[in-house]
Every structure is written in C-alpha cells, then in structure tokens.
Amino acid sequence: MRAAHLVGFLALIGLSACGAGKRDITLHDLRTNSGKPEEFAIVPNKPLQEPESFSALPAPTPGGANRTDQTPLKDAVAILGGRPERLDVGTGVPASDTAIISSASRFGRDPAVRQDLAADDLAFRKRRSLFTWSLVPTDEYYRAYRRQALDPYDWMERFRRAGARTPAAPPE
C-alpha cells in the first residue's frame, strides 16, 4: 500500500511539472537563479538638463521616452559614426533602402512573412520542448536547433575544394 502511495505521489509531481514553465517558450533562457539583481540591467539615468526655454517645453507623453532615459544602442551607433535615428520604430523605409527593397521584392512578397515565421518557429519550439523538462532551468536553444545548424569548418573546406577563396578562420 505504501508503494502505491509513493508511485501515485511521484506521478502527480511528474504530471504537474509537465505544464509548469512551458507556456511562454523563449529562444534563450537568460534568467539568473542567484536571487541577486542583474548588474548590467541597472543603468543610471542621464543627467538632468535645463531646457533653453521653459515656455517651449513639449507636452508629456504617457509611456513615451524621457530626455534622461538611457539609449545604449543609439549611443553605440552614434559613437561608431552611424545614424541613431534609424533605430526608431515606425520611421518606415528610408529613401536609401527603397532600391534594394524593390529589387528584393520584384517577384512579390508577403507582408505578413515575419508573423508567419514567428508562429511557425513557436510551433517548432513547442514540439521540440514537449519532453524536455528538468529541475534546473536550462537554455534549450542549441538543443532545439542542432539539426538545422551548419558546421562552418566543414563548409569552409567544401568551398576551398571547389576553388573558392575563403578567409582565414581560427582553428577549431
């Protein structure tokens, strides 16, 4: 009788673990289990600046960006000589990219291709993670996509045997 209770209890725990934590499948599991705050997620605000004219202050936008908010991606693009305003969402296609976009879509294009690919990829990851549970959270990304990964050194050798000039690569 005691063994039947133990088997029933273990089955209940196993069934409850099957559905826990698998509702939102992300590409990488970047959680830390230390219980401490992430050092790199804590970023101080930029220093406050006095505007040139207090009468020309913009109206506040709920949920919008502040002048003192950190913008590390834009700052990096500006330091490297790029145009940080191109990182803004909703700016549309820049005039400099219209020629390449029209050339790439000359045989037609599906406007919902990103949403379709995201839905297909989510279904693929759900199928792959059906029986991959563990007591410790792990990153399942490389295990899910290992059959689709290419060996760069194998392909470099294939191209070299075909006569293509390939750049040097670090040793394996």
Image: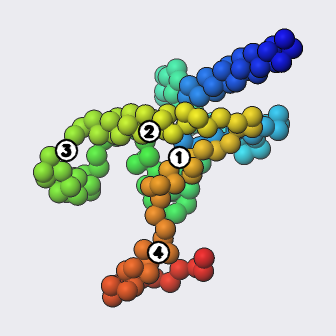
Q: Position of residue 144 (x, y in %)?
A: 53, 46
Of the 4 image quadrants, the one containing the N terminus is: top right
Cα distance between the residues tagged 3 and 1: 29 Å
Task: Give SS at disc 4.
Answer: helix
Q: Nearer the viewer, residue 28 or 86?
A: 28
Task: Give SS at disc 1.
Answer: helix
* Marker disc for residue 154: 4
* Marker disc for residue 109: 3
Give the class, few, some or many, for how many residues have Cα within 10 Å of label 4's Cα (few <14, many ≥20): few
Give the class, few, some or many, for how many residues have Cα within 10 Å of label 3's Cα (few <14, many ≥20): few
Q: Nearer the viewer, residue 45 or 135?
A: 135
Callout 2 amino acid: Phe
Q: Nearer the viewer, residue 116 or 11?
A: 11
Q: Nearer the viewer, residue 105 or 50?
A: 105
Cα distance between the residues tagged 3 and 4: 33 Å
Residue 140, quarter of picture: top right
- Decide: marks 1, 2 in contact (CB < 8 A)? yes
The answer to which of marks 4 and 1 sits earlier in the sequence is 1
Give the class, few, some or many, for how many residues have Cα within 10 Å of label 2's Cα (few <14, many ≥20): few
Callout 1 amino acid: Ala
Q: Residue at x 28, y 35 (%)?
A: 112
The answer to which of marks 2 and 3 sits earlier in the sequence is 3
Cα distance between the residues tagged 4 and 2: 26 Å
Callout 3 amino acid: Arg
Q: Which residue is mark 1?
A: 144
Q: Residue furthest left?
A: 107
Cα distance between the residues tagged 1 and 2: 9 Å
* Marker disc for residue 124: 2
- Classify 95 as above or below 164: above
